[in-house]
Image (cartoon, helix red, strand yellow):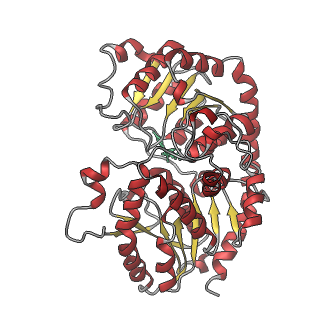
Amino acid sequence: MEERRGRKIIMFPLPFVGHLNPMIQLARIFHHRGFSVTILHTSFNFPDPCHYPLFTFRTIPHSNAGGEDPLTQPDASSMDLVAFIRLLRQTYAEPFRQSLAAEVGRGETVCCLVSDAVWMRNTEVAAEEVGVRRMVLITQGLASFCAFAALPLLRDKNYLPIQVSRLDELVTEVPPLKVKDLPVMETNEPEELYLVAIDMIEGANSSSGVIWNTFEDLERLSLTDISSKSQVPIFPIGPFHKHSDNVLPTTKNIEEHVTTNWLNKQEPQSVIYVSFGSLADIEEKEFLEIAWGLRNSEQPFLWVVRPGFIRGTEWLKALPSGFVENIGQKGKIVKWVNQLEVLAHSAVGAFWTHCGWNSTLESICEGVPMICTPCFTDQFVNARYIVDVWRIGIELERTKMDRKEIEKVLRSVMTKEGDGIREMCLKWKEIANVCLGKGGSSSKHLEKLVDHVLSFDS
Ligand code: UDP
């Protein structure tokens, strides 16, 4: 394995937690197989390299040399995600081109660039210019990617923009999705969303291969569908975080110690863990319904309320006075947790989630039933698969999320109705383990991926 040192893989993650985490996990997988890894990262949201001593980090400066970062200006922070991604791509197109050229110029043999699919064609010309092969990492599931790819067609067939009267109608082109499950979001730039879809598909199709954080057994039909249409090799080697290279000893900060101590005091499978990921935000009214629903369910809960999660309000300010004190030891509200550790804790009995793809995979791997409240894009698709295809969760639609409904759903998951789901969760956990084990599909795809990457410079 050592002979591969001196062969470098350059990675270019999208600077959001749900994209950076899987890229870093993939970096560890490559590093463990003898490659050296350099991560080119935007100056926006730059991670602390001290946490990742195995890799070399290089900062890509934003395009406004000597001036303010366009992404941290007030008009950027009020943008919706689609507009923000457009700005992100514009801001880093040229600086990335220059940084990649500089990196390649350092002399070490570069096997390939691995870039996040959402950078799309930004990276294509830059890689061609310096003669480096380009692989794409897709951090969403295969099923949601298929639905995303179908958006232009679905618009032509008048499913989009979504009409309220058709929400529960089956979309026959992408079953089992209903109109309400289509991977769209509220945006001031709806056309840009279609462009993103088209560009992402074309960017993947013109690459030297696509690496996917999923596993064959979970998304077999979608994999067959995509493989039949795609000209490039596909490597579903997930779940990345469960490869042995990613099972790491963790050092806890004080808040994490407090959380673990609290979990240690709870009964097995009694706690509802609540987190809506790193990007979603909600209205104050919704926040209060969640708070009361959790309290009224009388189940112990651990709730991640990120600063910025509630629109226009500071952290827990919206809660009635005395609310937190009244909950006492029954519930715990924190700003962030080590989610992998929380989901693996024996006290956790269910995960109320926004169904981000990482959260979905992490829950599947720990056999934890999900309560699904998707907020935007691929989360709707993931939720439909969790509930109707894999049968490991229950739906709690955001539009129906009042305190009574929340209490009902939470109780049902933790009691009888949750039992069938719990069995299915254990089944899927086992299937994921088999895929990752010796001779499993993800392990085999990983071997092929390594051979594929090594073939680039031979
Ligand atoms: N996460 C975490 N602590 C938290 C909330 C989230 O470590 O308190 C991690 C989680 O483990 C996952 C990522 O943040 O790896 C969120 O990614 P996901 O795709 O689920 O959602 P996104 O944040 O992209 O919407």
Asked if residue 382 is positioned above or below residue 334 in the image, the reply reads below
Look at the image and tell me in which quarter the N terminus lies: bottom right
Residue at the image point whose x is 53% and y is 37% from the top: 354
Viewer can see residue 298: no
List x then y, in percent, for residue 246. Answer: 57, 54
Comparing 86 with 451, the one in front is 86
Question: Looking at the image, how many numbered discs can be counted on the residues?
Answer: 0
Q: Position of residue 290 (x, y in %)?
A: 46, 23
Residue 254 occupies quadrant: top left
Residue 281 spot, x, y in % from top left: 41, 37
Image quadrant in which the C terminus is located: bottom right
- Residue at the location (69% across, 75% down)? 451
Name the residue located 40 percent from the left edge and 54 percent from the top edge.
83
Q: Is residue 103 left or right of residue 412?
A: left
| Percent coordinates x, y for residue 38 in the rendering | 46, 71
Q: Is residue 83 visible?
A: yes
Answer above or below: position of 451 versus 15.
below
Q: Nearer the viewer, residue 251 or 339?
A: 339
Q: Residue at x 76, y 30 (%)?
A: 423
Instruction: Write down the quadrant of residue 103 in the picture.
Output: bottom left
The residue lying toward the viewer, choosing from 345 and 47, is: 47
Relative height, residue 431 to residue 276 (above, below): below
The answer to whether residue 207 is left or right of residue 317 is: right
